[in-house]
Image (tube, rainbow, N blue to C red):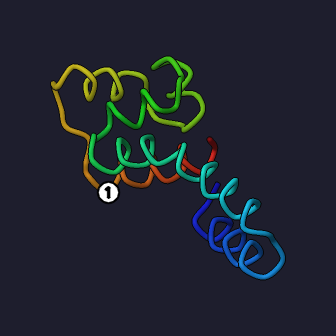
Amino acid sequence: MTYPEFLQQLDMAARDATVDDYLDEAENIAQHLPELYAIAHGGFRAVKETSGRSLKAFAFRYGIPLRTLEDWSAGVRHCPEYVWKMLGYIVWSEL
């Protein structure tokens, strides 16, 4: 769920839904918060783990050389912060 979708659902809940509907949607949103926190604060490894993909599948899906991902995972090189944040947003929106 993307942030705009979240806001749209929140708006719909406020207009059309009963309190029970609103609470159900809030529970649905709350179940994704641990993944969102991990992505936002955990760096590349957290993004990759949240995706549930192997390194090879992650490389193929996002067009990143496998060797680069291996280096990032092993700590040989560091993934730039802007890259893991962009990947984190994409991975989270695919959940």
Identify which residue, 63 or 85, lies in the foreground. 85
Q: Amino acid at mark 1?
A: Tyr
Q: Farthest residue toward the right?
A: 16
Identity of the residue drawn at 32% across and 20% down:
70
Circle 1 Cα neighbour tier, 10 Å, few/some/many (<14 / 14–19 / ≥20): few
- Could you tell whether 16 is left or right of 50 in the image? right
Q: Farthest residue toward the left?
A: 76
Identity of the residue drawn at 68% across and 66% down:
5
Which quadrant, please, contains the N terminus? bottom right
- Could you tell whether 93 is left or right of 14 in the image? left
Identify which residue, 33 or 44, lies in the foreground. 33
> Which residue is the site of mark 1?
82
Identity of the residue drawn at 53% across and 24% down:
52
Question: Residue 43's image quarter?
Answer: top left
Identify which residue, 40 or 76, lies in the foreground. 40
Q: Position of residue 75 (x, y in %)?
A: 17, 25
Question: Residue 60's image quarter?
Answer: top right
Secondary structure beneath dot 1 equals helix
Which quadrant, please, contains the C terminus? top right
Identity of the residue drawn at 38% across and 44% down:
39
- Could you tell whether 35 is left or right of 26 in the image? left
